[in-house]
Image: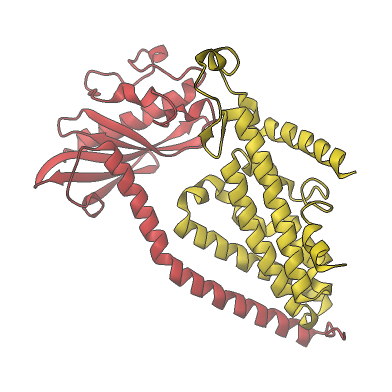
Amino acid sequence: MAKVESNFKNMTATLLVITLVASAALGLVYQSTMEPIDLAQQAKINNAIKAVLPEFDNQPGNEAYSVAVDGGELTFYLATKDGQPVGTAVKTFSNNGFAGLIELMVGFLPDGTINKVAVISHKETPGLGDKIEPQKSEFSVQFEGKSPENFKLLVKKDGGDVDAITASTITSRAYCDALARAYNELKKGGKQ
Amino acid sequence: MSKVAQLTKGILRENPIFVLVLGMCPTLATTSSAFNGMGMGLATTFVLLSSNVVISAIARFIPDKVRIPSYIVVIATFVTIVDLVMQAYATKLYESLGIFIPLIVVNCIVLGRAEAFANKNTIFDSLLDGLGMGIGFTFALTLLGSVREMLGNFSIFGLPIIPKEPFWLKEVFFHDPILVFVLAPGAFIALAYLIAIFNRFKK
């Protein structure tokens, strides 16, 4: 079959047509997946809130506010049931993980005690640092029902009250760092 | 070459992982579990299949000097489609594969098949070739992922494989999984053994 000649006009026209068709196709796909992607991300946040707070009947995603702190952002989700506050879920982070960023969702009861903690994302070592995930080990259980007021959020090696994960002290420290940051901002914000 | 051979050559005789040893980066990085390996394999299969078909259809209208940029644009388009669709409907898989989905663009299997096969064969043959190569790639990644997950986590597709009874079996023989297989060095070890076994039986 006769090949198209490689002159300037042919090459420009070919590339133009191909890129136009490609961008049209991508625009179409982007439009149709935009909504499902938004929903999927919201569902993820909502599931994390549900996992860390007692039962609520409002949409915490609509009553959220963010605070910029330490080069990142904390997001507070207020949950109520029958108009009564049942707690605040805080999306918090730490940059001190063994492999960088760790994002957690912490549920605080109105009196400031920790209800439950869920992991949103992390890159810790599988088998060692990933024990911060509630389904992988009991590590996160020790925080439940504790108030950071009298439960020092530092690993025992550093003079705190937290049992670190064996062989993952750095991860455990980062985890405590994220929790402490959430608690400090919650206290400062004064919004319960 | 018969149509059947066109399809099956990618699975056994010219398997992209075990024989051609192409696309090692996603192979080693995403196979920490059987599920991840299979997800990566299927995503690549879709890209391979679609780009092969489109490229074999348009190849004769493309001037030789701009063929590589043209192929890359076609491949990148399909990769972006996979990326968006996965983000919308398979969020969990999308998160565990992370950056490796966009990186399918630079997977040399995809461009390799476009340049070595699709641009000089018919659309139907290119479709069979893309499908066969994709299945071969998925098969290899799922197998590698299964082996690593079995040894490194005592599970396969997330299901535990160690029997609960009798209890001493777990205590004595299967106390701790071999963690290294989930980590990067385990990928090389497992892959080397699989290639050796595959070549033994190919002869």
Residue at image position (69%, 63%) is B48
What x and y, as percent, mark residue A60? 23, 49
- Does residue B139 sit above or below A53 in this rendering? below
Which shade is chain B? yellow
What x and y, as percent, mark residue B146? 63, 38
Extreme front residue here?
A: B166
Depth check, front residue: B33 or B8: B8
How many marks the image carries: the answer is 0
Depth check, front residue: B166 or A99: B166
What x and y, as percent, mark residue A131? 46, 27
- Does residue B195 sit above or below B153 in this rendering? below
Residue at image position (74%, 79%) is B58
The answer to whether residue A192 is seen in the rendering is no
- Does residue B130 sit above or below A67 in this rendering? below
Q: Along the horizontal axis of the image, is B156 left or right of A97? A: right
Q: Hey, which quadrant is residue B69 in on the image? A: bottom right
Residue at image position (13%, 41%) is A85
Depth check, front residue: B130 or A187: B130
Extreme right residue here?
A: B203
Q: The C terminus of chain B appears in which quarter of the rendering?
A: top right
Q: The N terminus of chain B appears in which quarter of the rendering?
A: bottom right
The answer to whether residue B2 is seen in the rendering is yes
Q: Along the horizontal axis of the image, is B12 left or right of A112? A: right
Q: Along the horizontal axis of the image, is B53 left or right of B116? A: left
Q: Which chain is rendered red in the image?
A: A
Q: Along the horizontal axis of the image, is B169 left or right of A58? A: right
